[in-house]
Image (cartoon, coloured by chain):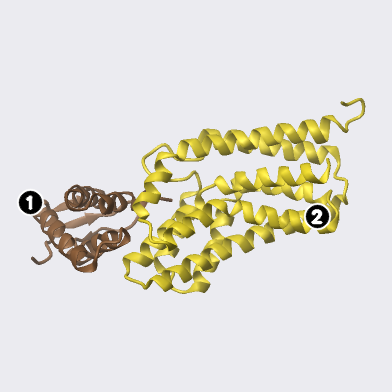
Amino acid sequence: MDILTSLAVITLAALVHSSFQLSVSVLTLLSGHAIGSSRSRSRLVGLTTSFVAGSAIITVLLLSFLAFVLSQLFGNQPPLLLWSVVCGIMLAVGIAVWIFYYRRQKGTSLWIPRGMAEFLRDRTKVTKSSAEAFSLGMTSVVGELLFVIAPLLASALILTTLPPLWQLLGIAIYAVVSLLTLGSVWVLIGSGHKLSEIQQWRESNKYFLQFAAGSALIVLGIFLYVFMVMANSPGGM
Amino acid sequence: MTDLAVDVVKRGKRPSELFARDKLHSSIVAACLSVQTPIRQAELIADTVCNNVLGWLERRPEVKSDDVRRIATKHLTVHHPDAAYLYEHHNIIL
C-alpha cells in the first residue's frame, strides 16, 4: 500500500473513531453541570478545553502504544494472519455497532457497561478543576475502547508499515480527525449554543451516525482484507 | 411551601429518601441555566414548577423518583420547553 493510500485509510479510520459518541455525551453532561452551577464562561471553557485535551492525549497515547507494540512484535511487515485478524475485528465491531451501539430507548444512551456509565455520570457531577476534566476526557475514551479498538488497531497496523516521519504525520492526522466531532461540540458549547439544541441534534441523528460508523468499519475491513491479505497471499491477486 | 413527608423511591439499588423541595428546585434551576436562561427567571420557573409538584405530591405517601421527574418535566415544558427537554433527558444522555 502506498503512503497516500495508507494515510487515506488512517483518515477514514479516524473518522469512524470520531463518530463514536461517549466523549461527546460526557462533554455535554460536563458542560450542563458547569453551566447549571453558575460557573463563569471562562471556567466552562477551561473545563471543556481540558476535557478535549485529555481525549486527544489518550487517543495519541493509545495509537502510539499499539503501533509500538505491533512494530516490536512484527517489524514493518506484519504477517497476513495479523491483517486477517484485524480485518475480522473490524467487521465484527462494525456489525456490533450496527446492531447495538445505541440502546433502544429515548435519549442517547450507549451500549457500554452501566457501571462505567454511572461512574462517568457521577464524575461529571463532581468535576470542578481542569485536572479532573482532563482525566475525565481520558477516561471517556477508555470507556469506549470496546468500539474504538477497531479503528485504532487498523491505523496502528498501517502505521507500522510507514517510514518513521510519515508515522508521525499519520498519528497527527488520526488525532486531529478523530477529534472532529468532539471539537465541533466543544466550539458550539464555547460559543454559547444551547445544550438542548446540541442534544436534540444528536438524538435526531443517532441512528444515522450509528449506521455510518458501522458501515465505514465494514467497508474499511473489507478494503484492508482485499488490499493487504488477498493481494499479498500466495496465488493472490 | 415546606417539604412534605413523602418517600421518594430511587432508581436501582439506591435507598429511598424524603422528598426535598430544595433538591428539585436546584435541579430545575440548573436545567434552565444550561439553556442560557437568566438566573432570576430560572428561579421563578423553578418556584412555580416546585409548587406544582408539591401539589401533585400532597395525597401520595410514596412516589418513584422517575415520577417526580416526569411531573416536573410536564410543568417545566409549559414554561421552558428547552430546559424541560434537558431535564427529562439528563439521565439518558450517557
Rendered image quadrant of residue A141: bottom right
* Depicted A1 relative to depicted A27: above or below: above
Q: Which mark is residue A166?
A: 2
Q: Which mark is residue B42?
A: none
Q: Which mark is residue B59?
A: 1
Picture coordinates of residue B14, whole percent (x, y): 33, 57
Q: Secondary structure at mark 2?
A: helix
Which residue is drawn at the image coordinates 82% and 36% (left, top)? Answer: A228
* Number of marks in picture: 2
Q: Looking at the colours in the rendered structure, which chain would you say is drawn in brown?
A: B
Picture coordinates of residue A206, whole percent (x, y): 45, 40
Picture coordinates of residue A236, whole percent (x, y): 88, 26
Q: Is residue B87 visible?
A: yes
The amino acid beneath tag 1 is Arg
Picture coordinates of residue A35, whole percent (x, y): 35, 65
Which of A80 and A161 lies nearest the eye of the viewer?
A161
